[in-house]
Image (spheres, helix red, strand yellow):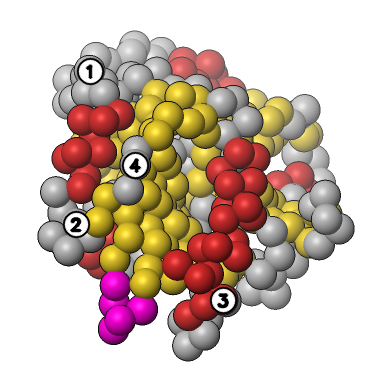
Amino acid sequence: MTHPRILAIASTALAVFVAAPYVRAIDIGSEKSGVTLHVPDFWKKAAIPKDEKATTVLRLERGSNKNPDTHCIFSIGMIVDEQNENPTLDVISKAFSQSFPKDWKSMPETPTTAGTGKLEALRSPYHFNASGVPGYVELLFFKRSNSYVFFEVICTQKAFEDLGKEIWKIEADADIKPGAGTVVKPHSSAAGAAATVFKEPTSGITLHLPAGWKQAEISEAEKGATVAKFELGVASSPDGYCVLELGHAVAGDGSASLKDFLKATATSFPKDWVADKVSDDVAGQQKFAALRAPYRFESSKIPFHLELLIFKRGNQYSYFETISTQKAFEKLSKSLREIEASAEIEAREEAK
């Protein structure tokens, strides 16, 4: 019995492919997976076969299976880690491949990235033969929150030789919502407590969070610039509670200074907030030049502390924002500075 994933290219007809120019690009997205693809308009949305609906959330088709060497299928799939087992990408790839026919030949896997946010990814290619025609399958696995998302390409070997660059560009240009980011396996901190490594793709920042910090939901009002949010403690015990946010924005050509960016950001703060002395600092292990800006305010007569640490790469401005009661900040300031200093921050070119 022919495996359902290769039925679309089982024809033995031969054709010569001539690459068409990118006359127009269209956006096709899958809300469930958080992925939006930017594809040339000769890619069309296709029906998902019944036997693939458990994992496939979007399927695109280029050309027709009447001409297999100009025909290609591109799918987005998703597997939810419901038990929070947090397997590695290579473990997911191996488990997924168990459903493939035994005569499919796996090729070496390669670490790579997915989307404009450059999420950590794993590329897994396969060769097979369908009715005498060499076929090619390639999977690109990456993670968002507790879901493993994958791009799957299936075509003849000849079609992939002609379309490979176009397909890889689609994968690289994909907009992948930050969601919950990528949580990497816990490790032990210097103090011996379990810590979590959180990789946020939009900003290209990886945080090393001590035990006790939990990811929090980003409110609708914060979604414009906030790409990740974390809490320590519970709000009902304010002097042990702190919120840490990671913000990111692309602004103009990058000519604005950090002070200019701070000034623009501060215009949204309430008028009764008191600005303390702004100081030069550094951010992350890479020691990017940064600006530290603390503020004081009161809420229900309780003194609060808010602090921004702003830095930039090209025209991309990022910041750590912490907010807590003044008493909580006095207790936690050392730990918060360690989180900022231990962050891994990607170098970035100017974003368009």
- Lower sequence index among marks 1 and 3: 3
For label 4, count other residues whose C-alpha is less than 10 Å away and answer few (under 14), some (14-19) or many (20+): few
Circles 3 and 4 in contact, beta carbons < 8 Å: no
SS assignment at label 2: loop
Q: Which residue is identified by label 3?
A: 240
Q: Check the image and report above or below for 163 versus 185.
A: above
SS assignment at label 3: helix
Residue at image point 53% right, 16% down = 161
C-alpha span from label 4 to label 2: 16 Å
- Lower sequence index among marks 1 and 4: 1
Q: Which residues are magenta?
A: 298-302
Residue situated in front as seen by the camera: 114 or 288:
288
Q: Check the image and report above or below for 59 versus 235.
A: above
Q: Which residue is identified by label 1?
A: 255
Q: Is residue 194 left or right of residue 212?
A: right
Residue projecting furthest to the right: 192
Circles 2 and 3 in contact, beta carbons < 8 Å: no
- Lower sequence index among marks 2 and 1: 1
As for residue 299 lying within the magenta part, the answer is: yes
Q: Locate residue 51, reporting x and y percent.
A: 55, 65
